[in-house]
Image: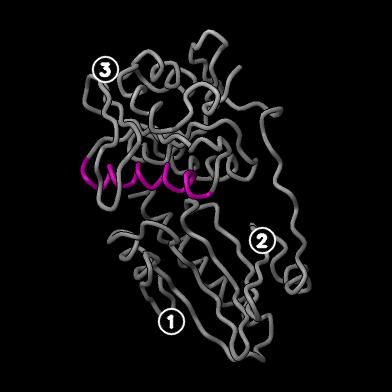
Amino acid sequence: MKTLKEQWGSEVKFTQHLATDLDSLNKINQLVGLPRVTKAVNELSIPGGSIDVVGYTDKGHVIVYEHQDQSGRADQTHVGKTSHYARILKSQGKQVLGAILLCDSIDQIFLDTFADIRWAYDRRPSYMGHCNVHAVKSQWTDNGDYEPKLFEDIDIIQKEEREIDHYRDFVNVYAKDWIIQREERNGDAVTLWHRMSELDSRYMLWVHTLKRSIKVGIHCLTGANEDDEQFLNSVKPEGFDYRRSQGRATLEKIFPIDTDPETLANATETLKRSIRKKVDQKIHF
């Protein structure tokens, strides 16, 4: 089997072709249980960018197809785009049935992320189609036939475990059940990144230790829009501040550098509880 780079050389060439190849789109749809599309558009413009391919069923319902670049390996940017684009179309009044990331390989953590997002879809499929997100392997036969398939264990690249150093004791005592992503150093600053299963991968929570203060909070990392701004302000606990910068939307609370770790953990849990209450209300609306 050939990869995207071997068969097409670039993502752009293939997605341009894919928008005219309904048979290939419907092969993908069949893998994840979506209906057939009868029309497709390449590079559909949306605020701040464009979607690789959008397919339309005969009822006018839409399906998003995002393809990883020629590197082939799914990254956080394209994982985030896949669910974000579906949300954008829903906010524009479209009936979204699902969103699919096409790639050569993917880390298990991203498959877990998509599974977490689909939790909302499974609870209310008729309303939460934009949360019906999947990853499908793009591959071609030696004859050039497109033969996508669902990822199997052999295709999954396990993400290397990164050591937690600065926050080791904090995690062991107060954050054992958090979905830890990584510990990141940037000069004197050290950040513990983690996430919530109730939110898509654009949202990341953090504990951020600086020289003179410690911050806890949450970022909407990419493509923050008015809906994200309204959501974050609606879940903002007392003592947290909202701000926007460089495309991010943020809630944060600042503490003195000598704040005990239990206080930091409790502030984070207060934020998470507020988010869960709001998400649960939306699902049962």
Q: Earlier in the sequence, mark 3 or mark 1?
A: 3
Q: Amino acid at mark 3?
A: Thr
Separation of residues labelled 1 and 2 (CA atoms): 27 Å
Comparing labels 1 and 2, the label whose residue is closer to the camera: 2
167 versus 110 height, above or below? below
Q: Which residues are magenta?
A: 76-93
Separation of residues labelled 2 and 3 (CA atoms): 43 Å
Dominant secondary structure of the magenta stretch? helix
Which scheme is used to colour this image of the protein? one colour
* Residue drawn where x is 31% and y is 35% of the image: 96
Q: Are marks 1 and 2 in contact (CB under 8 Å)?
A: no
Q: Which residue is mark 2?
A: 182
Q: Which residue is mark 3?
A: 38
**Circle 2 SS class:** strand
Q: Quadrant of the N terminus?
A: top right
Side of 242 where 276 appears, left or right: right
Q: Which circle marks residue 194 in the picture?
A: none
263 versus 17 height, above or below? below
Dot 1 surroundings within 10 Å: few (below 14), some, or many (20 or more)?
A: few
Q: Amino acid at mark 2?
A: Arg
Q: Which circle marks residue 238 in the picture?
A: 1
Q: Confirm whether the magenta stretch covers residue 99.
A: no
